Amino acid sequence: MSEIIFPPDFAWGAGTAAYQIEGGWQADGKGPSIWDTFCHEEGRVFGEQNGDVACNSYELWEKDLECIQQLGLTHYRLSFSWARLLPHGTTQHVNQKGVQYYNKVIDDLLACNVSPMVTLYHFDLPQALQDQGGWKSPSTAGLFDSYARFCFQTFGDRVKLWITINEPYVCAKLGNEDGIHAPGLREKGTAAYLVGHNMLRGHAMAWHSYDSLYRPQQKGAVSLAINSDWIEPLDPGREADVAAAERDLAFTLGWFAWPVFVTGDYPEIMRSAIDAQSAKLKHSGESRLPRFSEDDPTILGTADFFALNHYTSRKATAGGDCEETLCMKSDRNVEEVVDSSWPICGVSWLAVVPSGLRKLLKYIKDTFHNPAVYITENGFSQVGPLQIEDVHRCQFYKDTILEVAKAIEEDGVDVRGYFAWSLMDNFEWADGFSVRFGLFHVDFSDAELSRTVYRSGKEYAKIIAKYTSGQSK
Ligand code: GAL
């Protein structure tokens, strides 16, 4: 490729999530969420840390806005805290202070010519709804729809890009199978499928609500953010490895993308693997992978674009060491391997493979009918001693953005935007503050929680300036 080019209206963004940055966990009438509860239980999070204060964006939002402006972002992805807006989870009681807070954030962004992309649900279910069964309960989908309608009604005159649910895979599996995210359940081989099912139902209801009630006036777009690694066979010449890679993608990306973009139902590979494993283990009762019924909303077609969260790549081979146990791993029957040539930087799961993103984008184009794609999360972490001069991360962003350009130019993928994760260091879930994904460093030992740009933030700003130079902003 001679010179890399991006479409003139390409979205250059960075993202955050409410629980990871806001703090103010009890401020001004906010209700508790499952992450408040989870972090306050002993032994859940690294160093017993929590998001009670985090980056204190509830009070320091204007500092965040300065960072956004310094980077020259055209878009900023944030999430709403459901329990800040609706402390008990339902629209019967609205917290006006929460409405004011997000109104200010949105208005400030627009005044600076930055478009908001809002995620309605980024892992933080109101605790009041968890107490009634949480996402395992079918009625949570309807309550999510009411919350979504409230948000469309209140903020949709100004917000034009919506994400309903962030990473249903992570919510379902890490929260309900592995127990390492809130609500901390370890109900192996059952709960995650149920949670994923109700999330898909809730997402679809919200999309239909937008489509019929709000789209005509508001003219925005709605999707759900699906996380996926790029997966390839360990030995491409070995049939079992090829099948394992296909199965792995079906159980992660396919679990949510297949129903929404291809058939309205789960991938056949997933259904047959779970059914076969259930039979083998003589698991009785209804299918562990629920079925959509006539009363459910239509799932197919409920995304106006493809929102992809992508971090890393893996090689797949058949196997798994818990074949006799009821669990997702044995249903999937895949062993994932990191290629020895891929550097691991930051957290142990994050092998740096920029070319994997290009391959995944091409796969998405070919499999899901050439959708418009926003890369809603991509990034690379730092652990251990602080390095403001994060040269590896600079290289990562340069290499990755080049791969995105190639996907657009050479593979014809309709990529509309790229959102770096994250605007600033924040509460990285079970890893607490030990893992830093920011373009800005946040000094959590300083009462002011000062934000300092990393070298990678400067690099990203340069990239953005280069590709937006012809644009109005
Ligand atoms: C995603 C999540 C983000 C962020 C990121 C880095 O799964 O949506 O909130 O934590 O991972 O690990």
Image: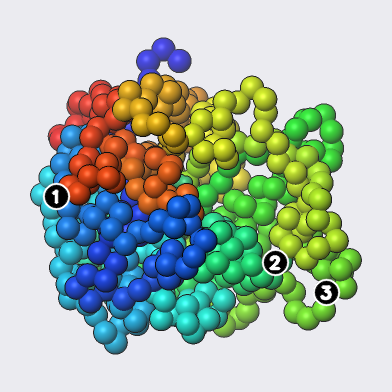
Q: Compared to 311, does 204 lie above or below?
A: below
Determine the image quadrant of residue 385: top left
Choose between 15 and 435: the one closer to the eye: 435
User: What amino acid is found at the position of numbered circle 2 in the picture?
Assistant: Lys
| Residue at screen point 39% across, 74% down | 126
First of labels 2, 3 by sequence position:
2
Left/right placement of residue 188 relative to residue 125 reads: right
Q: Nearer the viewer, mark 1 or mark 3?
A: 1
User: What amino acid is found at the position of numbered circle 3 in the picture?
Assistant: His
Choose between 345 and 94: the one closer to the eye: 345
Choose between 313 and 216: the one closer to the eye: 313
For disc 3, the neighbor class at 10 Å (few under 14, some 14 to 19, many from 20) is: few
Residue that label 3 marks: 283
Determine the image quadrant of residue 223: bottom left
| Residue at screen point 41% across, 81% down | 128
Left/right placement of residue 107 relative to residue 382 reads: left
Residue that label 1 marks: 62
User: What amino acid is found at the position of numbered circle 1 in the picture?
Assistant: Glu
Instruction: Say which element carries label 3.
Output: loop
Instruction: Say which element carries label 1.
Output: helix
First of labels 1, 2 by sequence position:
1
Image quadrant where one finds the N terminus: top left
Q: Nearer the viewer, mark 2 or mark 3?
A: 2
First of labels 1, 3 by sequence position:
1
Residue that label 2 marks: 188
